[in-house]
């Protein structure tokens, strides 16, 4: 299996932090490019853009800024931050994650078992389950506390 492009969907939870650690560690080994993707739901977009002077372009910049911070805090040693692309899109998270992966020759999707909103007692969050169901691209699900070295 050739791994040259790894996608990490983030919701800024500690689970996503760990997914970034694992993905960048793998990417170092495979000399792969990494894309971090955040999907805003339409409800979130409406709230964020309803504030005066906050057009969509500004929202994207603010979120990319948060993504860059999360990336820098969780980069595997030796993986250059310049090799990370930051993408922000609006829509339904599962659909957009799968669409991005399939349209951009992603070889592996790395994501957390859980995220920001779910219950720890649920086995897997709905976004992770949805992505696994909807795409044939391999998905690596990272469990908190078990980072790759
Ligand atoms: P649920 O959302 O079903 O209540 P949860 O929040 O615990 O449960 P998920 O939302 O499935 O779990 O999150 C699992 C992983 O999915 C996260 O670690 C992250 O990798 C990804 N993810 C979740 N939401 C988004 C999003 N809006 N944009 C990008 N990635 C996301
Ligand atoms: Mn969630």
Image (spheres, grey):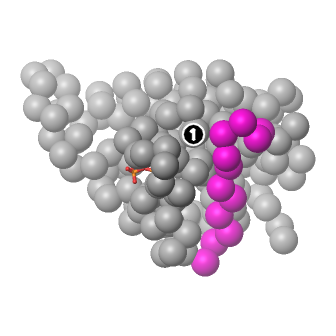
59 relative to 116 in the view: left or right: left
Query: Does residue 130 show up?
Result: yes
What are the residue bounds of the magenta stretch?
Answer: 136-147
Q: Tell me if the residue at label 1 has its CB under 8 Å from ligand 1.
A: yes
* Predominant SS along the magenta part: loop
**Residue 99 appears in the rendering:** no
Q: Is mark 1 on a helix, strand or loop?
A: helix
- Quadrant position of the C terminus in the picture: top right
Q: Residues within 10 Å of mark 1 (few under 14, many from 20)?
A: many
Q: Where is residue 143 in the image (x, y as percent from the top left)?
A: 67, 46
The residue depicted at 83 percent of the width and 27 percent of the height is 77
**Rendered location of residue 105, percent (x, y):** 63, 67
Near-viewer residue (132 or 108): 132
Query: Circle 1 sits on which residue?
Result: 16
Residue 135, quarter of the rendered image: bottom right
Left or right: residue 48 versus residue 121 is left
> What residue lies at 23% left-to-right and 40% top-to-bottom?
44
């Amino acid at each position: 299996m050739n791994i040259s492009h790894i996608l990490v969907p983030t919701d800024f939870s500690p689970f996503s932090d760990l997914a970034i650690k694992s993905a960048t560690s793998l990417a170092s080994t495979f000399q792969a490019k990494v894309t971090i993707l955040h999907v805003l739901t339409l409800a979130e977009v409406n709230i964020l853009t309803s504030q005066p002077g906050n057009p969509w372009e500004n929202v994207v910049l603010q979120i990319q800024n948060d993504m860059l911070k999360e990336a820098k805090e969780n980069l595997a040693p030796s993986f250059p931050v310049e090799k990370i692309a930051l993408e922000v899109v609006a829509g339904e998270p599962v659909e957009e994650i799968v669409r991005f992966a399939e349209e951009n020759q992603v070889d592996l999707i790395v994501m957390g078992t859980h995220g920001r909103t779910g219950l720890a007692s649920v086995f897997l969050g709905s976004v992770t389950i949805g992505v696994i169901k909807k795409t044939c691209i391999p998905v690596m699900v990272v469990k908190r506390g078990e980072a790759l070295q």
